[in-house]
């Protein structure tokens, strides 16, 4: 099961409130893949898609595409803001293994 941090729930409520969509949720999906592993996308959506895992945390809703949920099972959706970078991250789990053609940006 995927978990959601308090920080991610708080930021989600803030974003949805600002957009005037407090009853909506964030939907996470697999947006593509490279030799370094998958990349994920996020959309604001009113309702989950068929098959989505639905997580509610502190009044915020998260919808996770079924195949994405399987890939990030046991991991946590978190929100970071350290002054230099800000955004949702998926933490935990095993880092992707990069092949020799991947280049220095991987890992």
Image: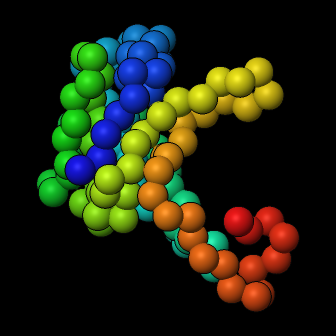
Task: Determine whether, in the image, residue 24 is placed left or right of residue 96.
Answer: left
Task: Determine whether, in the image, residue 107 is placed left or right of residue 31.
Answer: right
Q: Is residue 14 above or below residue 87?
A: above
Q: Is residue 94 visible?
A: yes
Quadrant of the rendered structure where residue 95 is?
bottom right
The front one of 12 and 47 is: 12
Measuring from the top left, give residue 67's x and y in whole percent. 30, 66
Measuring from the top left, give residue 49's x and y in whole percent. 21, 50
Q: Is residue 34 visible?
A: no
Instruction: Name the residue: 53% across, 30% down.
Output: 79
Task: Determine whether, in the image, residue 64 is placed left or right of residue 87.
Answer: left
Q: Quadrant of the C terminus?
A: bottom right
Instruction: Name the residue: 80% across, 28% down.
Output: 84
Q: Which residue is farthest left? A: 50
Measuring from the top left, give residue 85's x and y in whole percent. 73, 31
Instruction: Name the residue: 54% across, 42% down.
Output: 89
Q: Which residue is farthest right? A: 104
Instruction: Name the residue: 19% across, 41% down.
Output: 54
Tag count: 0
The front one of 46 and 53 is: 53
Measuring from the top left, give residue 65's x and y in whole percent. 29, 55
Q: Is residue 5 above or below residue 76?
A: above
**What colour scheme governs how the chains and residues are painted in the rendered image of this protein?**
rainbow
Q: Is residue 96 above or below residue 55?
A: below
Quadrant of the rendered structure where residue 81 is?
top right
């Amino acid at each position: 099961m995927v978990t959601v941090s308090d920080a991610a729930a708080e930021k989600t409520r803030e974003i949805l409130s600002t957009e005037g969509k407090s009853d909506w949720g964030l939907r996470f999906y697999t947006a593509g893949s490279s030799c370094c592993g998958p990349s994920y996308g996020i959309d604001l959506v009113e309702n989950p898609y068929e098959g989505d895992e639905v997580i509610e945390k502190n009044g915020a809703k998260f919808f996770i595409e079924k195949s994405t949920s399987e890939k990030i099972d046991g991991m946590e959706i978190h929100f970071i803001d350290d002054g230099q970078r800000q955004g949702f991250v998926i933490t935990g789990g095993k880092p992707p293994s990069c092949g020799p053609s991947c280049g220095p940006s991987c890992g």
